[in-house]
Amino acid sequence: MLLATQDEFQTHLFIDDAGSYCAQYDGFILRSVFQPIFDKQMNIFGYEALLRIQDSNDQPIRPDLFFSDLSRTLEQILNIERLSRVIHIRNFSTFAPLGCKLFLNVLPESAVLLYTSHLPDINAMLLESRISALNLSPQNIVFELVEFHYQDEKRLINAIEMIKKHDFFVAIDDYGSEASSAQRVSQLNPNVIKIDRELLLKYEGGIKAPLLSALSIAKKQEALTIVEGVETPHQYELMKKLNIGYFQGFLLGKPLPLHEQNHQAA
Protein backbone atom coordinates (compact mmCIF):
# COMPACT_ATOMS: atom_id res chain seq x y z
CA MET A 1 0.00 0.00 0.00
CA LEU A 2 1.32 3.42 -0.94
CA LEU A 3 1.35 5.88 1.95
CA ALA A 4 -1.06 8.69 1.18
CA THR A 5 -2.68 10.21 4.27
CA GLN A 6 -1.26 12.21 7.14
CA ASP A 7 -2.19 9.47 9.63
CA GLU A 8 -0.41 6.84 7.52
CA PHE A 9 2.76 8.93 7.39
CA GLN A 10 2.56 9.84 11.07
CA THR A 11 2.78 6.21 12.20
CA HIS A 12 6.29 6.00 10.72
CA LEU A 13 7.69 9.28 12.11
CA PHE A 14 9.65 9.98 15.27
CA ILE A 15 11.80 12.81 16.63
CA ASP A 16 15.41 12.13 17.70
CA ASP A 17 17.24 13.61 20.67
CA ALA A 18 18.34 16.65 18.65
CA GLY A 19 14.75 17.50 17.70
CA SER A 20 15.02 16.34 14.08
CA TYR A 21 12.27 14.35 12.38
CA CYS A 22 13.18 10.81 11.32
CA ALA A 23 11.21 7.88 9.92
CA GLN A 24 11.12 4.12 10.28
CA TYR A 25 9.80 1.88 7.53
CA ASP A 26 10.25 -1.81 6.73
CA GLY A 27 13.18 -2.09 9.15
CA PHE A 28 14.97 0.96 7.72
CA ILE A 29 15.70 4.19 9.59
CA LEU A 30 15.56 7.38 7.51
CA ARG A 31 17.28 10.63 8.48
CA SER A 32 17.85 14.02 6.86
CA VAL A 33 21.08 15.81 6.14
CA PHE A 34 21.35 19.05 4.17
CA GLN A 35 24.11 20.44 1.97
CA PRO A 36 24.20 24.21 1.40
CA ILE A 37 24.16 25.85 -2.04
CA PHE A 38 25.89 29.22 -2.31
CA ASP A 39 25.56 32.13 -4.73
CA LYS A 40 28.50 34.10 -6.19
CA GLN A 41 28.69 36.31 -3.10
CA MET A 42 28.86 33.17 -0.92
CA ASN A 43 25.42 33.75 0.55
CA ILE A 44 23.34 30.65 1.16
CA PHE A 45 20.81 30.24 -1.63
CA GLY A 46 19.33 26.98 -0.43
CA TYR A 47 19.91 23.49 0.88
CA GLU A 48 19.74 20.15 -0.88
CA ALA A 49 18.07 17.58 1.36
CA LEU A 50 19.89 14.26 1.27
CA LEU A 51 18.60 10.99 2.66
CA ARG A 52 20.58 8.78 5.01
CA ILE A 53 19.34 5.18 5.26
CA GLN A 54 20.28 2.60 7.88
CA ASP A 55 19.21 -1.03 7.79
CA SER A 56 18.07 -3.12 10.76
CA ASN A 57 21.73 -3.73 11.71
CA ASP A 58 22.44 0.03 11.78
CA GLN A 59 24.50 -0.30 8.61
CA PRO A 60 24.33 2.62 6.15
CA ILE A 61 22.96 2.08 2.65
CA ARG A 62 23.78 4.48 -0.16
CA PRO A 63 20.47 5.99 -1.37
CA ASP A 64 21.45 5.80 -5.05
CA LEU A 65 22.11 2.07 -4.69
CA PHE A 66 18.94 1.58 -2.67
CA PHE A 67 16.68 3.28 -5.21
CA SER A 68 18.29 1.52 -8.18
CA ASP A 69 18.14 -1.95 -6.56
CA LEU A 70 15.90 -4.03 -8.80
CA SER A 71 15.16 -6.47 -5.97
CA ARG A 72 13.13 -3.82 -4.13
CA THR A 73 9.46 -3.33 -4.85
CA LEU A 74 8.21 -0.09 -6.37
CA GLU A 75 5.90 0.31 -3.36
CA GLN A 76 8.84 0.15 -0.94
CA ILE A 77 10.91 2.58 -2.99
CA LEU A 78 8.09 5.10 -3.37
CA ASN A 79 7.06 4.92 0.28
CA ILE A 80 10.62 5.51 1.46
CA GLU A 81 10.98 8.39 -0.98
CA ARG A 82 7.69 9.89 0.23
CA LEU A 83 8.70 9.52 3.87
CA SER A 84 12.05 11.12 3.13
CA ARG A 85 10.24 14.10 1.61
CA VAL A 86 8.09 14.39 4.74
CA ILE A 87 11.03 14.48 7.15
CA HIS A 88 13.07 16.78 4.90
CA ILE A 89 10.27 19.36 4.72
CA ARG A 90 9.57 19.22 8.45
CA ASN A 91 13.24 19.57 9.36
CA PHE A 92 13.68 22.39 6.86
CA SER A 93 10.71 24.30 8.27
CA THR A 94 12.07 23.83 11.80
CA PHE A 95 15.72 24.74 11.32
CA ALA A 96 16.29 26.61 8.02
CA PRO A 97 16.74 30.40 7.87
CA LEU A 98 14.03 32.41 6.15
CA GLY A 99 14.26 32.88 2.40
CA CYS A 100 16.20 29.70 1.57
CA LYS A 101 15.09 27.17 -1.01
CA LEU A 102 14.75 23.49 -0.24
CA PHE A 103 15.98 21.14 -2.97
CA LEU A 104 14.22 17.76 -2.88
CA ASN A 105 15.27 14.79 -4.99
CA VAL A 106 12.37 13.18 -6.80
CA LEU A 107 12.25 9.97 -8.82
CA PRO A 108 10.55 10.16 -12.24
CA GLU A 109 7.99 7.56 -11.07
CA SER A 110 7.20 9.64 -8.01
CA ALA A 111 6.82 12.85 -10.02
CA VAL A 112 4.34 11.13 -12.32
CA LEU A 113 2.33 9.77 -9.39
CA LEU A 114 2.46 13.08 -7.53
CA TYR A 115 0.96 15.12 -10.36
CA THR A 116 -0.82 14.09 -13.53
CA SER A 117 -2.23 16.07 -16.41
CA HIS A 118 -5.65 15.98 -14.72
CA LEU A 119 -5.90 16.11 -10.91
CA PRO A 120 -3.10 15.79 -8.36
CA ASP A 121 -3.37 12.66 -6.23
CA ILE A 122 -4.10 12.82 -2.50
CA ASN A 123 -0.36 12.76 -1.75
CA ALA A 124 0.15 15.95 -3.76
CA MET A 125 -2.72 17.69 -1.99
CA LEU A 126 -1.34 16.57 1.37
CA LEU A 127 2.09 17.87 0.37
CA GLU A 128 0.73 21.30 -0.49
CA SER A 129 -1.37 21.53 2.66
CA ARG A 130 1.58 20.53 4.86
CA ILE A 131 3.86 23.06 3.17
CA SER A 132 1.31 25.78 3.91
CA ALA A 133 0.83 24.60 7.51
CA LEU A 134 4.60 24.78 8.04
CA ASN A 135 4.68 28.41 6.84
CA LEU A 136 6.40 27.51 3.57
CA SER A 137 5.24 28.07 0.02
CA PRO A 138 5.78 26.15 -3.23
CA GLN A 139 8.29 28.86 -4.22
CA ASN A 140 10.50 27.60 -1.38
CA ILE A 141 10.62 24.11 -2.90
CA VAL A 142 12.75 22.89 -5.81
CA PHE A 143 12.04 19.38 -7.06
CA GLU A 144 15.29 17.87 -8.37
CA LEU A 145 14.44 15.26 -10.98
CA VAL A 146 17.13 12.60 -10.60
CA GLU A 147 18.99 11.15 -13.55
CA PHE A 148 17.09 7.84 -13.74
CA HIS A 149 15.49 6.88 -17.04
CA TYR A 150 11.71 6.68 -17.39
CA GLN A 151 9.93 4.87 -20.18
CA ASP A 152 6.89 7.12 -20.64
CA GLU A 153 8.42 10.51 -21.37
CA LYS A 154 5.03 12.03 -22.27
CA ARG A 155 3.63 11.30 -18.80
CA LEU A 156 6.79 12.66 -17.21
CA ILE A 157 6.56 15.87 -19.25
CA ASN A 158 2.91 16.31 -18.22
CA ALA A 159 3.76 15.72 -14.55
CA ILE A 160 6.59 18.25 -14.58
CA GLU A 161 4.34 20.82 -16.24
CA MET A 162 1.77 20.32 -13.49
CA ILE A 163 4.44 20.67 -10.80
CA LYS A 164 5.48 24.00 -12.29
CA LYS A 165 1.86 25.15 -12.63
CA HIS A 166 1.51 24.61 -8.87
CA ASP A 167 4.36 27.13 -8.44
CA PHE A 168 7.09 24.68 -7.49
CA PHE A 169 10.51 25.03 -9.08
CA VAL A 170 12.01 22.14 -11.07
CA ALA A 171 15.68 21.24 -11.40
CA ILE A 172 17.44 18.66 -13.54
CA ASP A 173 19.85 16.88 -11.20
CA ASP A 174 23.31 15.64 -12.25
CA TYR A 175 23.16 17.08 -15.77
CA GLY A 176 25.51 15.08 -17.97
CA SER A 177 24.76 11.77 -16.22
CA GLU A 178 22.46 9.04 -17.58
CA ALA A 179 19.02 10.49 -18.48
CA SER A 180 19.90 14.04 -17.33
CA SER A 181 20.64 15.10 -20.89
CA ALA A 182 20.06 17.93 -23.33
CA GLN A 183 16.95 16.09 -24.54
CA ARG A 184 15.45 15.97 -21.05
CA VAL A 185 16.21 19.66 -20.52
CA SER A 186 14.57 20.53 -23.81
CA GLN A 187 11.48 18.47 -22.99
CA LEU A 188 11.02 19.64 -19.40
CA ASN A 189 12.26 23.25 -19.55
CA PRO A 190 13.52 23.26 -15.93
CA ASN A 191 14.09 26.34 -13.79
CA VAL A 192 17.48 25.02 -12.64
CA ILE A 193 20.19 22.82 -14.15
CA LYS A 194 22.55 21.16 -11.69
CA ILE A 195 25.79 20.27 -13.46
CA ASP A 196 27.21 16.87 -12.57
CA ARG A 197 30.63 16.75 -10.91
CA GLU A 198 32.00 14.62 -13.77
CA LEU A 199 31.69 17.59 -16.13
CA LEU A 200 33.62 19.71 -13.63
CA LEU A 201 36.37 17.09 -13.44
CA LYS A 202 36.56 16.84 -17.23
CA TYR A 203 36.82 20.62 -17.49
CA GLU A 204 39.57 20.67 -14.89
CA GLY A 205 41.41 18.00 -16.89
CA GLY A 206 41.24 20.00 -20.10
CA ILE A 207 38.11 18.51 -21.67
CA LYS A 208 36.04 21.67 -21.64
CA ALA A 209 33.33 21.09 -24.25
CA PRO A 210 30.82 19.09 -22.14
CA LEU A 211 30.61 21.68 -19.36
CA LEU A 212 30.56 24.63 -21.76
CA SER A 213 27.78 22.92 -23.71
CA ALA A 214 25.79 22.51 -20.48
CA LEU A 215 26.17 26.22 -19.72
CA SER A 216 25.08 27.10 -23.25
CA ILE A 217 21.97 24.92 -22.94
CA ALA A 218 21.13 26.47 -19.58
CA LYS A 219 21.45 29.97 -21.03
CA LYS A 220 19.21 29.03 -23.96
CA GLN A 221 16.59 27.63 -21.54
CA GLU A 222 16.99 30.65 -19.21
CA ALA A 223 17.70 28.21 -16.36
CA LEU A 224 19.79 28.89 -13.29
CA THR A 225 23.01 26.87 -13.08
CA ILE A 226 24.47 25.08 -10.07
CA VAL A 227 27.78 23.24 -10.32
CA GLU A 228 27.96 20.23 -8.01
CA GLY A 229 30.96 18.60 -6.37
CA VAL A 230 33.24 21.58 -5.81
CA GLU A 231 35.89 20.07 -3.54
CA THR A 232 39.09 22.10 -4.03
CA PRO A 233 39.96 25.83 -4.22
CA HIS A 234 41.24 25.28 -7.76
CA GLN A 235 37.90 23.87 -8.90
CA TYR A 236 36.07 26.72 -7.23
CA GLU A 237 38.22 29.36 -8.96
CA LEU A 238 37.77 27.65 -12.33
CA MET A 239 33.99 27.64 -11.95
CA LYS A 240 33.82 31.26 -10.79
CA LYS A 241 35.58 32.33 -13.99
CA LEU A 242 32.77 30.71 -16.02
CA ASN A 243 30.16 32.98 -14.44
CA ILE A 244 28.22 30.03 -13.03
CA GLY A 245 25.43 31.22 -10.76
CA TYR A 246 25.60 28.83 -7.80
CA PHE A 247 28.00 26.38 -6.18
CA GLN A 248 27.70 23.22 -4.10
CA GLY A 249 30.36 20.89 -2.73
CA PHE A 250 32.41 19.70 0.21
CA LEU A 251 34.77 22.67 -0.06
CA LEU A 252 31.90 25.02 0.72
CA GLY A 253 29.70 22.97 3.01
CA LYS A 254 29.28 19.32 3.96
CA PRO A 255 25.99 17.44 4.32
CA LEU A 256 24.94 17.75 7.96
CA PRO A 257 21.71 17.81 9.96
CA LEU A 258 20.25 21.24 9.45
CA HIS A 259 20.53 22.27 13.09
CA GLU A 260 24.31 21.73 12.81
CA GLN A 261 24.71 24.00 9.79
CA ASN A 262 26.29 27.41 10.33
CA HIS A 263 23.74 29.24 8.10
CA GLN A 264 26.30 32.01 7.64
CA ALA A 265 28.02 33.08 4.44
CA ALA A 266 31.25 31.11 4.00
Image (spheres, rainbow, N blue to C red):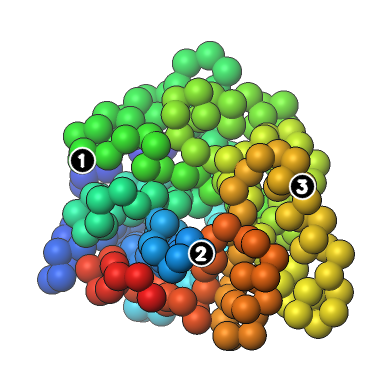
Q: Residue at x 59, y 48 (%)?
A: 224
Label 2: element kind? loop
Label 3: element kind? helix
Query: Tag 1: residue type?
Result: Leu
Determine whether label 3 and label 1 are within 8 Å by CB: no
Where is residue 46? Give x, y as percent.
40, 56
Please give left or right for residue 224 compared with residue 51 in the image.
Answer: right
Front-most of residues 41 and 260:
41
Q: Residue at x 50, y 44 (%)?
A: 143
* Closer mark to the observer between disc 2 and disc 3: 2
Which disc number belongs to residue 40?
Answer: 2
C-alpha separation, residue under disc 1 versus residue under disc 2: 29 Å
Query: Tag 2: residue type?
Result: Lys
Q: How crowded is mark 2: few (under 14 residues within 10 Å), some or many (20 or more)?
A: few
Query: Tag 3: residue type?
Result: Ile
Residue holding disc 1: 134
State which tag comes first along the sequence, 2 or 3: 2
Where is residue 231? Give x, y as percent.
57, 81
Residue holding disc 3: 217
Where is residue 201? Give x, y as percent.
73, 77
Please give left or right for residue 182 compared with residue 127 in the image.
Answer: right
For residue 211, what is the image quadrant?
bottom right
Determine whether label 1 and label 2 are within 8 Å by CB: no
Q: Residue at x 41, y 57 (%)?
A: 45
